[in-house]
Image (cartoon, helix red, strand yellow):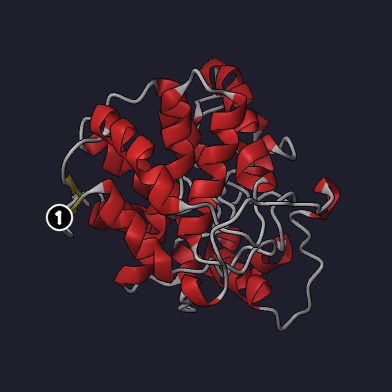
Amino acid sequence: MRIVDPSQVVRPEECHNTKDKAAFRNYDVGTESLVRKTYNEMHKRQTYDFVTKQKEKWTKLNKMDMTIFEALEMLNSLVDESDPDLDLPNIIHAYQTAEGIRKVHPDKDWFHLVGLIHDMGKVLALWDEPQWAVVGDTFPVGCAFSSECVFSEAFQDNPDSRDPRYNTKYGVYQPYCGLKDVHMSWGHDEYLYQVVVGNNTTLPEEALYMIRFHSFYPWHSAGAYEHLLDEDDRNMLQWVKEFNKFDLYTKCPDMPDMDELKLYYQSLVNKYLPGKLRW
């Protein structure tokens, strides 16, 4: 895990991102890149058995108690090793995403909060979980892997790809069962979803869905795994796509003035996820 002191690499100022949208999520990287290595490990090690054990371990929410802003401060020291677009601490990306959403959707305060907290599940990487079990695009386990996943060739080293229980189109699932009944690869999406639900959030269903599936790019960007979706998933797709505009295209090397913005976002935390949460 790379540790970065944000005070050494950025200053609070307005973000001017001139990068073309087509340049984001460019995975044409060398075989020795950290991005590729992270995905190779993920695709090799994220099995159905691994995911179910991780869920059992982490959804007890007995690691510690802390507030939203305490969790955000932890992200000061985390750089996502799967992200080809940005090499800055995750807390900066949190504020960039939230502020991008607030400019376009000023009337949806819950949406602003989703932008701020969507990656907070990455605190797992600061509790000794390897980044291949925390970050990156997610995908279903327990059924055949899709070639639409980035670096999908690495799935050939996953034992589930040779297990007849898990390597067919539907695997352990029923057709059109809905993503609510599908085990996704373990990472920050599912973990944060379990945290907010387990702490009785009042965020709406759209918010919870965005948190849980915002990294499921093989589906919402490439149309894979349609055979597992139900009507609720299809209805929620528009919200995930809207969220991902800001998750992707607000990334830039400048940092928002987090001290100035904190008062506003504290009011949203008080409304939807107050006090110390169980993690």
Residue furthest bottom as drawn: 32
**Of the pair 268 and 44, the residue shown nearer to us:** 268
For label 1, the crowd category at 10 Å Cα-Cα, with few meaning under 14, some 14 to 19 and many 20 or more, is few
Q: Which residue is mark 1?
A: 62
Residue 159, image x, y percentages:
54, 66
Q: Give the answer, above or below, for where 24 lies relative to 225.
A: below
Residue drawn at 59 percent across, 56 percent down: 13
Residue 125, image x, y percentages:
39, 68
Residue drawn at 28 percent across, 24 percent down: 202
In screen coordinates, is 60 left or right of 78? left
**Amino acid type, mark 1:** Asn
What is the quadrant of residue 220 in the picture? top right
In screen coordinates, is 111 left or right of 263? right
- Residue 4 visible to an observer of this rendering: yes
Residue 248, image x, y percentages:
66, 47
Q: Give the answer, above or below, for where 37 lies relative to 224.
A: below
Residue drawn at 24 percent across, 57 percent down: 57
Q: Give the answer, above or below, for where 4 lies relative to 241.
A: below
User: What secondary structure is marked by label 1?
Assistant: loop
Residue drawn at 63 percent across, 51 percent down: 14
Report the number of numbered marks: 1
- Residue 142 visible to an observer of this rendering: no
**Of the pair 32 and 44, the residue shown nearer to us:** 32
**Of the pair 270 and 40, the residue shown nearer to us:** 270
Residue 230, image x, y percentages:
55, 20
